[in-house]
Image (cartoon, grey):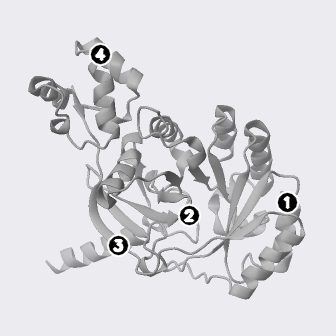
Amino acid sequence: MNPQDIKSMTLAEIQADFSKTGLPAFRARQVFHWLHRGAASFDEMTDQSLAFRSTLSEQYYIAGAAVEKKQKSKLDGTVKYLFRLHDGELVESVVMDYHHGRTICISTQVGCKMNCAFCATGKSGFSRNLAPSEMLAQIQAAQADLGTRISNVVMMGMGEPLDNYENVLRFLELVSSSEGMNIGMRHISLSTCGIVDKIYDLAEKKLQLTLSISLHAPNDEIRSRTMPVNRRWGVGELLKACRYYGEITGRRISFEYAMISGVNDSDACAKELAGRLKGTLSHVNLIPVNNVTGAGFQKSSADRLKRFSAILSEKGIPVTVRRTLGSDIDASCGQLRRRYNKEVDSVESLQ
């Protein structure tokens, strides 16, 4: 029998599994607490007997995330991690300091299928989904390395969360558990490029997290050029789903808008975007686009950002410009992994 991924199991599931296999069910809560405090092995569970720990190691395994590479910004203290998983795959996480606490941006997949034109992750292809335990492990590994608690989670790293829907839901249940890491839903943001059917499904869950939509364009012509997902679900369908989500959950949606010079940053785009979002429970977050190698995009000028923001405000659309963090360490998702893999390939080719 192959060992099971115990950290991806809920407390109730561990209790049931222990009972089924003859293990003492009352131990399940103790083991669950150890797992969510970040125990990397069963040997760390020192209040359990040696025999019990040995049995656990035969029937289960604990998914972890080992620090492969770490970068720290000299400008603002942002920390970027490249984590190696049990099968050798690499994922990225970024830890940022805000006035409301320390926030981690985690990955939900190894790579991504969405292939957005301005994103470094998609250019490396897709390998696999992450298990709930591997999402938890990123938070735990960062906390252990930094020696501090992380209070906020952003699911905006490598991958498309709603393309890994069931595992993401399980992660959300685990990370918010009062007996686990106890990070409340209002401290969690989930970002999607617009998987419309899953937005409807997520709405029915009525979770109190923040849903962020990577919109990046006011119309189908521009969005389809930069985001292939738009050819499946156009802007109209996406915004209809967003309005439904807002009505069902009562939660304001954050629309992420990467400002790309000469592509989506004109006055006309700003006015069209304002018209599209009128009446929607929303907030627009303008983002200076990252300079991704091979993408050929340049970020909008400061004056253009200011003008675009002013138009949205004049039209009654709440808007902010995202503060750039970690600019000296390529803190946007996918960049460190791409560069690291290229460096490894270069070394291996010389051997």
Q: Nearer the viewer, residue 51 or 215?
A: 51
Query: Quick check: 171 left or right of 275?
Result: left
Under circle 1, the secondary element is: helix
The quarter in which the C terminus is drawn is bottom left
Please give the residue where the numbered disc 1 appears in the rendered image: 276
- Residue 130 is situated, as x and y percent measured from the top left of the image, at 40, 46
Identify residue type, mark 1. Arg
Q: Which mark is residue 71?
A: 3
Identify residue type, mark 2. His
Q: Nearer the viewer, residue 169 or 121?
A: 169
Q: Can residue 2 be spotted in the picture?
A: no
Under circle 4, the secondary element is: loop
111 w.r.t. 133: above or below: below
**If you read the primary sequence from the N terminus, does the residue marked by circle 4 or circle 3 appear first?**
4
Residue at 64% x, 33% y is: 205
Residue at 32% x, 75% y is: 342
Please give the residue where the numbered disc 4 appears in the rendered image: 25
The quarter in which the N terminus is drawn is top left
**If you read the primary sequence from the N terminus, does the residue marked by circle 4 or circle 2 appear first?**
4
Residue at 10% x, 27% y is: 50
125 w.r.t. 12: above or below: below
Measured in 3D between alpha carbons, the distance from the residue under mark 4 to the one under mark 3, in whole angstroms, is 42 Å
Please give the residue where the numbered disc 2 appears in the rendered image: 99
**If you read the primary sequence from the N terminus, does the residue marked by circle 4 or circle 1 appear first?**
4
Query: Quick check: 84 left or right of 112?
Result: left
Identify residue type, mark 3. Gln
- Residue 210 is situated, as x and y percent measured from the top left of the image, at 64, 49
Measured in 3D between alpha carbons, the distance from the residue under mark 3 to the one under mark 1, in whole angstroms, is 40 Å
